[in-house]
Amino acid sequence: MSSPEQQLLDLSAQLLQAIDAGNWDAYTKLCDPRISCFEPEAEGHLVVGLPFHKFYFDLPPSGRKQLSSISSPHVEVIGDVGLVYYVRLVQKTTDAGPITVSSNETRVWKREGGTWRHIHFHRSPC
């Protein structure tokens, strides 16, 4: 069995894969329905709940590939709460060619009944 730290890192990677693939079902299986966040798309506001995020999953596919990688991760477990901090590197294509963009991300997970659920995140550009 893997350590809680490794489980959280793996779950965070699965979450990014779901985002990259536009897989709403996989995303919602990992997230608490009342997930909260601060992210650039929210323009400085705290967002609570999944509907804000579903808007982006429902957009028509761009036809462009995207690959997210976790760089320089740090994982901390405090009881039934897990914190995962890392730099997210996103490789994607644009009309000008391939680019890589980065952001600082903090993901907060809570363990209930032996299952980790994503409850909060903060994302900001590097």
Image (cartoon, rainbow, N blue to C red):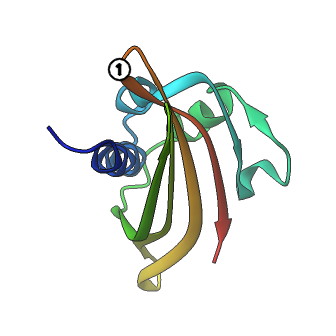
- Residue position for label 1: 114
User: Which quarter of the figure has residue 72?
Assistant: bottom left
Please tell me whether mark 1 sits on a helix, a strand or a loop. Answer: loop
Q: Is residue 25 above or below residue 57?
A: above
Q: Percent x, y for residue 74?
A: 45, 64
Q: Is residue 70 above or below residue 28?
A: below
In the image, farthest residue toward the bottom: 96
Count of picture labels: 1
Residue shown at the point (36%, 56%) measured from the top left: 63
Residue shown at the point (69%, 43%) measured from the top left: 37
Closest to the observer, 71 or 83: 83
Residue shown at the point (51%, 77%) measured from the top left: 101
Residue shown at the point (36%, 42%) measured from the top left: 18
Q: Percent x, y for residue 122?
A: 66, 53
Q: Is residue 20 above or below residue 47?
A: below
Closest to the observer, 11 or 113: 113
Q: Percent x, y for residue 41?
A: 72, 53
The C terminus: image quadrant: bottom right
Q: Amino acid at mark 1?
A: Gly
User: Which quarter of the figure has residue 29?
Assistant: top left
Closest to the observer, 119 or 113: 113
Q: Is 102 on the left or on the right of 1, as rendered?
A: right
In the image, farthest residue toward the left: 1
In the image, farthest residue toward the top: 113
